[in-house]
């Protein structure tokens, strides 16, 4: 019986070693997948930049070039508004809702509310903080979604118009 137990202990040690090795392989595979994703993203960016040789195909890169400064300002403003509402939401709902239990999950929940993903339940927010939750939610939606997303669309359209006008003028000459 003792020999059988020793053999099982040895088998258990082999299994643990196998699963440790498998865990290392999985971590390495995740690193390789991340590197592949970054590489593909780099290739897409290079493709967009290389398309500038043609007047019509390079509209994306010329549009991004035309709106770079405005886009940087927009994302700075977007960051501060999301941060402000995240801090307020964390204060209002931190103890009551799972989506606001810590700062990181509060940021994710606030981004989800802008239509990026699965937003926290509105009724749960109202039951946790009452009328102030309604004011907070609708102010965030109006400012974050309608105003900021409209501004982003206006920036992109203006940049596209400017890039398109330069291409049309160059194409005609």
Image (tube, rainbow, N blue to C red):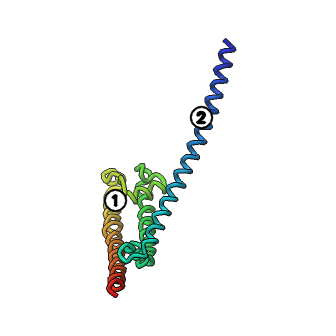
* Between marks 2 and 1 in the image, the one whose residue lies nearer the viewer: 2
Dividing the picture into quadrants, the one containing residue 153 is bottom left
Give residue 92's position: percent from left, percent from top: 41, 57
Residue 66 position in % (x across, y down): 41, 79
Residue at the extreme top:
1
The secondary element bearing badge 2 is classed as helix
From what the image shows, is residue 137 above or below residue 4? below
Front in this rendered view, residue 109 or 85: 109
Residue, disc 1: 115
Picture coordinates of residue 163 (x, y %)? 36, 80
Considering depth in this image, is 109 or 75 the residue closer to the camera? 75
Q: Secondary structure at mark 1?
A: helix
Locate the C terminus by quadrant: bottom left
Label at residue 99: none
Residue sticking out furthest to the bottom: 173
Of the numbered discs 2 and 1, the one sitting upstream in the chain is: 2
């Amino acid at each position: 019986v003792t020999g059988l137990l020793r053999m099982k202990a040895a088998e258990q040690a082999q299994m643990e070693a196998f699963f440790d090795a498998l865990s290392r392989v999985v971590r390495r595979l995740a690193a390789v997948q991340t590197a592949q994703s970054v590489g593909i993203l780099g290739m897409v960016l290079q493709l967009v930049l290389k398309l500038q040789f043609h007047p019509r195909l390079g509209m994306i890169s010329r549009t991004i070039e035309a709106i770079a400064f405005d886009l940087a300002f927009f994302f700075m403003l977007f960051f501060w508004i999301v941060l402000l509402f995240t801090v307020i939401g964390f204060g209002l709902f931190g103890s009551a809702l799972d989506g606001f239990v810590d700062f990181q999950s509060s940021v994710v929940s606030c981004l989800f509310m802008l239509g990026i993903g699965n937003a926290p339940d509105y009724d749960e927010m109202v039951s946790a903080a009452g009328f102030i939750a309604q004011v907070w939610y609708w102010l965030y939606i109006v400012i974050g979604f309608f105003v900021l997303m409209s501004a982003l669309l206006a920036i992109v359209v203006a940049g596209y118009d400017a890039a398109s006008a330069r291409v049309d003028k160059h194409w005609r000459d």
